[in-house]
Image (spheres, rainbow, N blue to C red):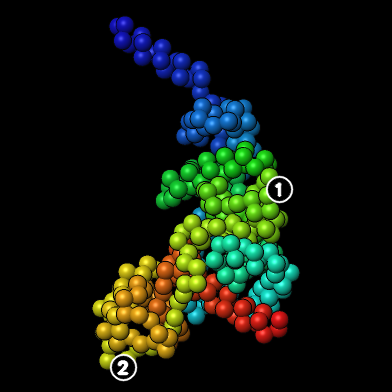
Amino acid sequence: MRNIIFIIGAVATSLAFAVEIPGGAYQGRSDVSAFIKRLALETDYTEKELVDLFAQVEKQEHLFEKLDKPAEKELDWYQYRGIFIKDTRIERGVKFWREHRELLAAVSDKTGVPAEIIVAIVGVETFYGVYKGKDPVFDSLVTLAFDYPRRASFFKQELEQFLLLAKEQGFDARALRGSYAGAMGMPQFISSSYRHYAIDFDEDGQTNLFDSIPDIAGSVANYFVRHGWQRDGRVARPLTAAENNSIDALEPGLKPTYKWADLKRSGLASDFEISEDTPVALVRLQQRDHAEYWAGFENFYVITRYNHSELYAMAVYQLARLISHHYKKTA
């Protein structure tokens, strides 16, 4: 009997201290209440601050379809390339580089990441800041954390990282807008990347990836450095296949797990000199009526840490080369 009374008392105590969300799409959700309770205990947020934030959330159900069908999974290379490799994006990239010539040179000199790669990332991600995203980051992350089971664990972590980021940087959590997956600013960092890789390059006391070009350029470069970027290293080289080849026995991928000698033995050749013991990945890209092959080096793999797709990395690389060509031609 005493044990029964104890259990009843513990339940009553737990209920008495349960978090109540007074409104919004997540009113009455015990899983959200538990999340709030834990963060209030483990972070600098008060329970009231968190309750006030969650009480205003509007569920963003339109995000589910976007996450289920990302362009990198749905399109072939010839379709994907056409989205990003355009004259307007190249021209804007050259203009962006000219406007921030000294800054980009300083960042590149310090980190070893070429200016054109930094410019291309900003170009691919937000068209140099024109399209930073319109979705409310907080509402998006709450929706995906608690109503998108397939990736709930990931987005719950990102939601926590976002709240910590907002507290650290003094951001208004409800005011920030970004991509459908919660990426923010001109280089589109997710919250965990923002906290771990973004830097205050202009040393003004805030790491601002929305408006500070020094912080944006420095943070993109720092992201690559932290993921293993090799100064003066190659990114990718096109390959040609012999008529009689055994390429099908190889596994295309992102990470350079083969040696160049392995690809040569399978009937692939390069116009560029590559040492036989050089680590390479076999990158396969589907054109409209044939496949093309590239050797991907360590720096190609590093670009895929930004977005885990060979299509994305190749778009960044080819855009960077075109921007560099036009920049140097008109310098």
What percent of the width, then of the height, locates residue 33? 51, 31
Most distant residue in the front direction: 109
Left or right of 236 in this view: 318: right
Q: Quadrant of the C terminus?
A: bottom right
Residue at the image point whose x is 62% and y is 63% from the top: 107
User: What residue would you read off at disc 2?
Assistant: 243
Which mark is first along the chain, 1 or 2? 1
* Nearest to the observer: residue 329 or residue 37: 329
Q: Which mark is residue 310?
A: none
Q: Position of residue 290 (x, y in %)?
A: 41, 86
Query: Label 2, label 1: how many angstroms apart (C-alpha)?
Result: 59 Å
Q: Residue 147 location in percent, x, y?
A: 48, 45
Q: Amino acid at mark 2?
A: Glu
- Contact flag, marks 2 and 1 (Cβ < 8 Å): no
Q: Residue at x 62, y 78 (%)?
A: 323
**Which residue is at the front of the view, 241 or 1?**
241
Residue at the image position 27 percent from the left and 92 percent from the top: 244
Q: Is residue 265 left or right of residue 228?
A: left
Q: Report helix, strand or loop for mark 2.
A: loop
Reading the image, the residue beneath label 1 is: 204
Q: Quadrant of the N terminus?
A: top left
User: From the viewer's perspective, is residue 193 above or below residue 40?
Assistant: below
Q: Nearer the viewer, residue 75 or 220?
A: 220
Label 1: few (<14), some (14–19) or many (≥20) C-alpha neighbours in 10 Å: few
